[in-house]
Image (spheres, grey):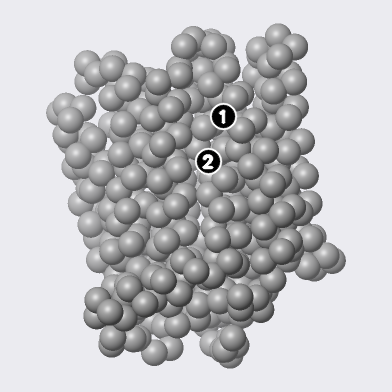
Amino acid sequence: MRTPSVPAAAESGITILVLALLLSIQPVTTDLYLPALPTLTYALGASVTQGQLTLSALLLAFGCSQLFWGPLSDRWGRRPILLTGLLLYTLASIGNTLAASMDLLILWRTLQGVAMGAVVMCGRAIVRDLYTPVAGARAMSKALTGLGVVACLCAPIGGWLADALGWRSALLALTAYALLTLAMVWRHLPESLPQPNPQALRPAILLRTWGRVLRHPTFWAYSLLTTASYGGLFVFLASSSFIFIEVLGLERTRYGAVLFSTGVAYFAGTFLCRALMARFGLTRTVAIGGLLSVSGGGLVMAVAAAGWHTPLALLPPFYLFMLGHGIHQPCGQSGCVAPFPDAAGVASAFNGFMMMLVAFATGAWVSAQLNGTVWPLVQGVGLFSVLLGAIAWGLVQKFGHPDANT
């Protein structure tokens, strides 16, 4: 496998900051409006299922669009695709704010998901452009630490905006974030792709590249890791606003504090990831993350089975799951593109597509299962924790070394 030299831009702290902004656009888009989701669903005269669709449709569009954006970025470079995506995202954010019906809101959220696909896919591909595989996992961990900070702040800010200024203000805040990120990319992030591939969009070349990525066991090991980890998180995101506010009786501001606390756990997990990698290496770090995931999911199930259906009982086990999530995402997102320095856009796109496809299916399942109890959240997190243990201790240990070629 070719090991490129690390460009000077990779050594810049501003590059990590911009990467953090790019990757954080996903939790900003999903988490900031969650405290307002029950209110906006009621205000627009919609059902709970329609309200959930504002999240699941966005994520399906996000995942599918990456299959389109990935080859484009390999052909034309990351920077033009990033700028295009951020402009589309800004327009869609304004449309969200002005939507007069749930149907229009879902439409604008879908377009926002398409645009978000360009931003996040390019962010992940840029890590492979600038860093060797193991260094990429460390850099991704630093960028996702920034994502953790943003995720911590999103829910409290969203709850405060919804209470003080109404639910539309939470959607309008996304426009400000997009404009800030656009300015930072324009000013501080040059093109990272050393040599665009002029053949990347030719059907025969594209199919060959897809086949090479999809046949590689390292790609599958790390993509399944990130997908299962995100699936468990998405169970929480899709169900928690209804369960914690409507079932367990929390106020929106306190629910914002709940999301803040889970973000802190994820934030801590990214720090733990870097410390563990320095001592144990990539695959053993993932194995330790698997132990945290399984412990968290198992304890959530045990607490619920014991009848302790309160936030104070359910949250501590979920914090263990989020610590594991803070390990699995940087290791998985960098590991799945590591074998493909010349096709990082395609590999990143397939990884993102897998995560969002599972998220969409999970959102549909959660919507059908919401029944006035905590069990949809508990059962979903428990299932994904078991899958994470199997992937982290099995597939990643066998196929997850950065120099794996078969």
The answer to which quarter of the image holds residue 295 is top right
Q: Amino acid at mark 2?
A: Gly
Dot 2, crowdedness within 10 Å: few (<14), some or many (≥20)?
many
Q: Position of residue 318 (x, y in %)?
A: 67, 32
Q: Of the two numbered discs 2 and 1 on the same chain, state the one appearing first in sequence.
A: 2
Residue at x 65%, y 76% (from the top left corner): 404
- What residue did someone put label 1 on? 380
Asked which secondary structure carries label 2, the reply is: helix
Q: Mark 2 touching mark 1, by CB under 8 A? A: yes
User: Does residue 264 appear in this view?
Assistant: no
Task: Count the numbered circles shown.
Answer: 2
The residue lying at 63 percent from left, 42 percent from top is: 387
Name the residue that disc number 2 marks. 231
Q: Residue at x 69, y 71 (%)?
A: 401
Residue 11 x, y percent position in the rendering: 60, 81
* Three-letter amino acid code at the position of disc 1: Gly
At mark 1, the secondary structure is helix
Question: Mark 2 to mark 1: distance in Å?
Answer: 8 Å
Work out which quarter of the rendered image holds the C terminus and state it: bottom right
Q: Residue at left 24%, top 80%?
A: 202
Q: From this viewpoint, which residue is outermost toward the right?
A: 279
Q: Nearer the viewer, residue 335 or 13?
A: 335
Q: Position of residue 366 (x, y in %)?
A: 45, 26
Quadrant position of residue 83: bottom left
**Observer able to see residue 210:** yes
| Image quadrant in which the N terminus is located | bottom right
Q: Who is closer to the viewer here, 384 or 131?
A: 384
